[in-house]
Image: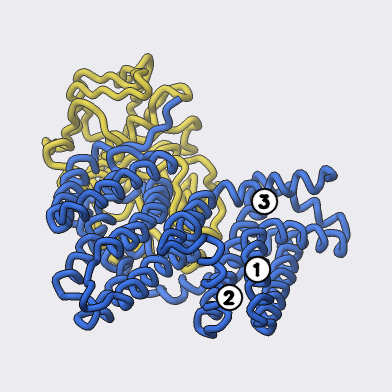
Chain colours: A yellow, B blue
Amino acid sequence: MLQFENVYKSYNQQPVLEIDNLTLDRKIYWLQGINGSGKTTLLRILAGQIPFSGDILLEGISLRQNPLSYRRLVSFAEAEPLYPDFITGLELVRFYQDIRQSAAEQTDMLINLFRMHRFLSLPVGTYSSGMVKKLSLMLAFIGKASLILLDEPLATLDEGSIHILPDLISAYSKEFKTCFIFSSHQPFKSYPQEIDRIAITNQSVQVVT
Amino acid sequence: MNIIHTVLVKSLVKTFYRQHAGLFVFLFIVMFGAVGRVDNAGLLDYHLSLVRAMLGNPFLFLIILFLWFLYAQKSVQYIVSTLRRPDFSFLHMLSLLGRKRLFRLMLWIQFLLFIPIIIYLLIIFIAGFYSHMYLPCLAATVYLFVIWIITARWYLFVIQNPGMSSSIPRMVVLFKGMRMPFGGLFLRYIVRNKKLLFSGIKLYSCCILYLMVINQTKVEYDLSMITLFFSLGILGHGLLIHQLRDFEETRLTFYRSLPVTMLHRFAQYTILYIVLLLPEIITIILLTPKYLHVKDAVIFFLLAYSVLLFLNSLLFIEFYPMKDYLKITFCIFFVLFLSVLTVTLPLLCLVFFLSSAGIFFWRYYRFERVTVF
C-alpha cells in the first residue's frame, strides 16, 4: 500500500532518514523513536510537505510523478499546528471541505464528536493550544484519505478527546480502509484494534509486529 | 535608567524597531535616498518645500495624519500582542506598580516608539514657523499628543487586565460566511498586520508616478527617470512580499500537503499580485491617455506585475534573510536601470514573467525553509 524507494533526507549535511526499500500494508502504525530521531520529518515527507530524495508510492501513485493524486490520498495533522490568528475554525473547516470535496454530514459528525461548536465561529488566535490541536485533528479527518498521518495526536488534548481518537481511528479504518501512521510518546487509553509499530533508529525505519 | 525601564525598553521598544527595521530602511531610502535627488535642490530645501506643501494642502495634511494614526495602531498592535505572549507574561507584574506610575512608564514607552514621528513633527515645526503656518503645526502637535495619551492608556488597560481578549476582529466579521480563497488569506494578513507598510509603499509608488507623469510636457516626453523612480516603489514591495512568504511558511504550511494543482497554486499568486497592484493600476488608468501613452501605460503595468511575481518566486529558491533579499532587490534595480538605458523594458518584463513561472514550478515542492547552523 505504501512503498518507500531509496528515501533519503538530510539537514545541514547530516543524514536524518535513510530508507532503502520498505513496504507498509494498510494497517494502523505507531511510529516510535527517541526525540530527534526523525519521526516528524518522516511524517512531513509522507505528507508531501518537505522535499527529499527517492520516491514514495501510495496505492501505486508516486509522490514525485503525480503529486496531486498522491496528496488527494493523504491527510496530515501536525504536532504543533499553526494557523493564521485571524481565521475562524469554521473558515478552515470549509476550506478543507472544499478542497477535499467532502460531505457536510461528515464535517458535522466530526464537529459533534470533537465538541467544537462553541469555538468554530471564533478566530483561531483566541483558541488554547489544546483547541488548535483538536481543530487540526478534526481537519485531518475531513475527506476519505487512504493514509492519515497524526503527529503527536495526544499532546495537549483533554481527557474526552483522548478517548475519542482511538474510536475514530477504528471507524475510519473499518469504513474507509484508511491506513494510519501516528507518532506518540504516550500510549492511547484504549487501542484501536491491532497496532503495528514502526521504529526509527539510526536513521533507518523498521516495522516491528 | 532603572531596571524596570531597561527591561521594558528591551522587551518592547528594541524588539519593535528590530522587527520593523525593513520598513524604516525603506522609508529612509524613500525620504532621503531617492526623492532627495529629484532635482538639484539641497536635501533640506527639498524637504522643507515638501513640508510646506503638506501644511498648505489640507488633503496632504490629512494623509500624513492618517499615516501617523496607522503607525500608532501598528505600535499598539505590536505591544498588545507582545504583552499577551506567554514568554512576556512576566510583564503583567507591572500592574503591582500602581496606576499612575505605570501610566507614566507606558507614556515613556510610547514616546520612544513615536521617535520617528516626533522627528518629523520637529521638521514640520521648523518649516511651519518659517512659513508662519502656526495653526497646522498646532493641530499636528495636539493630534499626536492625543494619540500618545490614548495608546499609553490602552497599554495600561492591557497590563491591568491580563487575559481579557478584545472582541472578534472586524475583518473576521467582514469575511464571515464568504468562501475563502487561499490568496485572500494574504490580503487579510496585510489588512490586519501590514497596513502601514502597505500604505507607505502605495503612497510612494502612486504619488511618485502621478506627480512625475503630470509634470511631463508633450514636447519633452521622456519616461526614463519616472520609470526608475516608479521601479523603486515597485521593488519596495519586496519588503511586503518577504513578510507574506514568512507568513506562508509559518502559518500556512498545511496548504502544501493539500491536493491543489501547481497551476492553481501559481494562479493564486498571480491574482493576489493583481489585487495588490490595484492602486497603481488605478493611477495608471487615471493618467492614460492624457499624460501617458497607452503603450507606456501597459509597460508600467507589466513592469510592476512581472517584478512582483519575480520577487515572490525568488523566495522559493531560498528563504533569504531580509538583508540578502534587499541586496537582490538592489541588483534587480540595477538590471532595470540597464534595461531603461537600452530601451528593452518589454523584453525584461517577459523575462521576469517566464522566470517567475519557471522558478515557481521548479522550486515549489523542492523548497524547504531550513535554518542552517
> In terms of depth relative to the viewer, which is nearer, A81 or A165?
A81
Residue at (26, 74) in percent of width and height: B284
For numbered disc 2, what is the local secondary structure? helix
Residue B112 pos. (x, y %): 70, 56
Q: Earlier in the sequence, mark 2 or mark 3?
A: 3
Q: Earlier in the sequence, mark 3 or mark 1?
A: 3
Residue at (50, 32) in percent of width and height: A186
Q: Where residue B65 is drawn, which disc sits there?
A: 2
Which residue is denoted by mark 1 in the rendering? B121
User: Quick one: label 2, few (<14), some, or many (20+) residues within 10 Å?
Assistant: some
Which amino acid type is marked by label 3?
Val
Structural distance between the alpha carbons of marks 2 and 1: 11 Å
For numbered disc 1, what is the local secondary structure? helix
Q: Is residue B178 left or right of residue A177?
A: right
Residue B148 pos. (x, y %): 71, 69
User: Where does the N terminus of chain B fall, quadrant-wise?
Assistant: top right
Which residue is denoted by mark 3 in the rendering? B13
Residue A53 pos. (x, y %): 22, 26
Which amino acid type is marked by label 2?
Leu
- Write down the chain letter for disc 1: B
Structural distance between the alpha carbons of marks 2 and 3: 22 Å
Quadrant of the image occupied by residue A151: top left
Residue at (82, 61) in percent of width and height: B104
> In terms of depth relative to the viewer, which is nearer, B163 or B8?
B8
Structural distance between the alpha carbons of marks 3 and 1: 20 Å
Which amino acid type is marked by label 1?
Leu
Question: Mark 2, mark 1: which one is toward the viewer?
Answer: 1
Question: Mark 2, mark 3: which one is toward the viewer?
Answer: 2
Residue at far top of view? A202
